[in-house]
Amino acid sequence: MALLCIADVLDAAACAGAREAFGRLPDRDGRSTAGWAARGAKQNRQLDPADPQVQALADRLVTAVGAHPVLRQFARPARLGAPLLSRYQPGDAYGLHVDDALMGEPPLRTDLAWTLFLSEPDSYDGGELVIDSHEGETPVKLPAGAMVVYDCGALHRVSPVTRGERLACVGWIQSRVRDSRQRELLFTLDQARRALHAREGDSQEFLQLSQVHSQLLRMWAEA
């Protein structure tokens, strides 16, 4: 599973409030938060993370992300890093790059990255998040309030915006399960046992699946 898309992380009112905040809060050159190798590939603006109102908005958004049940099942988050609030206007883009493995202080191990879309997709052209894998490139452009989560080691880029404005919140997760294959197996098993419970309740098969899920989580999870 190269990526996971999650709908309705934010409702329409929360998205509208975030877009309104972008119009009145201070921003700065996005290259100021890029690693040394990615700095030359990045051209966008970001809300100034030193501003208290920007911090408050970022806190609200990352809280909504971290509380989503599907995100918690998939990512098994131990820590969520401080997010960035990004603005792309015509001519802006972020070339192919890989995120730093460690970010912040104390260092956050970046197992997963996420992008929460704040602009409706028909309000801008271009601006797809393009994730590279062995199967090729996967462009992602989701409705406002939806998010995509993907392995942080993947090469990725944001294609140039040619019309309108792309607003997004991006962040990183340190998982309690470091290995991506193990996380995906746990997620698939958890989805299966939940579907079985919805259909059959506390059946013998559900209890067996739950036992296997719990044992694997004990085996692989970091405290």
Image (cartoon, rainbow, N blue to C red):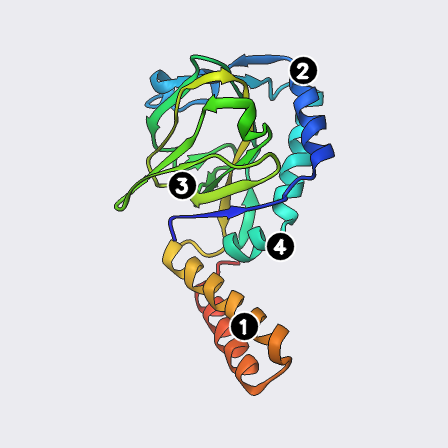
Q: Which residue is mark 2?
A: 25
- Tag 4–tag 2 contact (CB < 8 Å): no
Q: Does residue 220 appear left or right of residue 167 in this picture?
A: left
- Check disc 1 and report its element: helix, strand or loop: helix
Tell me the crowding category of disc 2: few under 14, some 14 to 19, or many 20 or more residues within 10 angstroms, Cα based: few
State how far apart marks 4 and 3 are (Cα). Answer: 20 Å
Residue 114 location in percent, x, y? 50, 39
State how far apart marks 1 and 3 are (Cα). Answer: 27 Å
- Tag 1–tag 3 contact (CB < 8 Å): no
> Looking at the image, which residue is at 51% across and 77% down?
209
Amino acid type, mark 1: Arg
Q: Does residue 146 appear left or right of residue 14 in this picture?
A: left
Tell me the crowding category of disc 4: few under 14, some 14 to 19, or many 20 or more residues within 10 angstroms, Cα based: few
The residue furthest bottom is 204
Residue 185 location in percent, x, y? 42, 64
Q: Which residue is mark 3?
A: 152
> Looking at the image, which residue is at 65% across and 48% down?
67
State how far apart marks 2 and 1 are (Cα). Answer: 45 Å
Residue 146 location in percent, x, y? 58, 40
Amino acid type, mark 4: Pro
* First in sequence: mark 4 vs mark 3: 4
Q: Which residue is mark 4?
A: 69
- Check disc 4 and report its element: helix, strand or loop: helix
Q: Which residue is mark 1?
A: 193
